[in-house]
Amino acid sequence: MTIPIGELPAERPWPDDVWCHLACTTCEQLFRLSAETYRGRGGVLEQIAS
């Protein structure tokens, strides 16, 4: 399932895994934010392009 992050419901249930692509408005670098929402194991923010 793919939906814009702004459309995730404020209340649960969320999907078990959430990915979001972000672009820096200053340097235009692209990043991917991934989070595991079910078990609370954390997430990762990684650069995917420069």
Image (cartoon, rainbow, N blue to C red):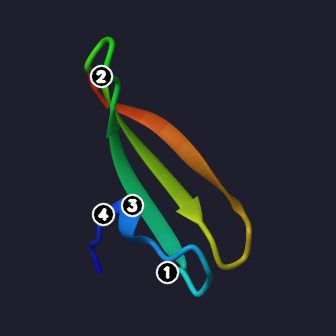
Query: Looking at the rendered structure, which numbered label has been put on residue 29?
Result: 2
CA distance separating discs 1 and 4: 13 Å
Which residue is drawn at the image coordinates 27% and 73% (left, top)? 2
| Residues tagged 4 and 2 counted as in contact (Cβ below 8 A) | no
Q: Calculate the distance from the C-alpha at mark 4 to the C-alpha at mark 2.
A: 19 Å
Quadrant for the C terminus in the image: top left
Q: Give, as a three-letter code, the residue at label 2.
A: Gln
Secondary structure at badge 2 equals loop
Task: Say which mark, if any, is on residue 15.
Answer: 1
- Percent x, y for residue 13? 58, 87
Q: Which callout, 4 or 2, points at the residue further toward the start of the chain?
A: 4
Element type at mark 4: loop
Say which label, 3 or 2, has the lower sequence index: 3
Looking at the rendered structure, which numbered label has been put on residue 5? 3
- The kind of residue tagged 3 is Ile
Lower sequence index among marks 1 and 3: 3
Judged from this view, the residue extending furthest toward the top is 27
Specify the amino acid type for callout 1. Pro
> Image quarter for residue 22?
top left
Is residue 27 placed above or below 4 in the rendered structure? above
Question: Crowding at label 3, few (<14), some or many (≥20) Cα neighbours within 10 Å?
Answer: few
Q: Nearest the camera: 25 or 38?
A: 25
Q: Is residue 22 left or right of residue 33?
A: left
Instruction: Give coordinates of residue 48: x percent, y percent.
Output: 31, 34
Q: Which numbered tag is attached to residue 4?
A: 4
- Measured in 3D between alpha carbons, the distance from the residue under mark 1 to the one under mark 2, in whole angstroms, is 26 Å
Image quarter for residue 39?
A: bottom right
The residue lying at 33 percent from left, 13 percent from top is 26
The residue positioned 30% from the left and 63% from the top of the image is 4
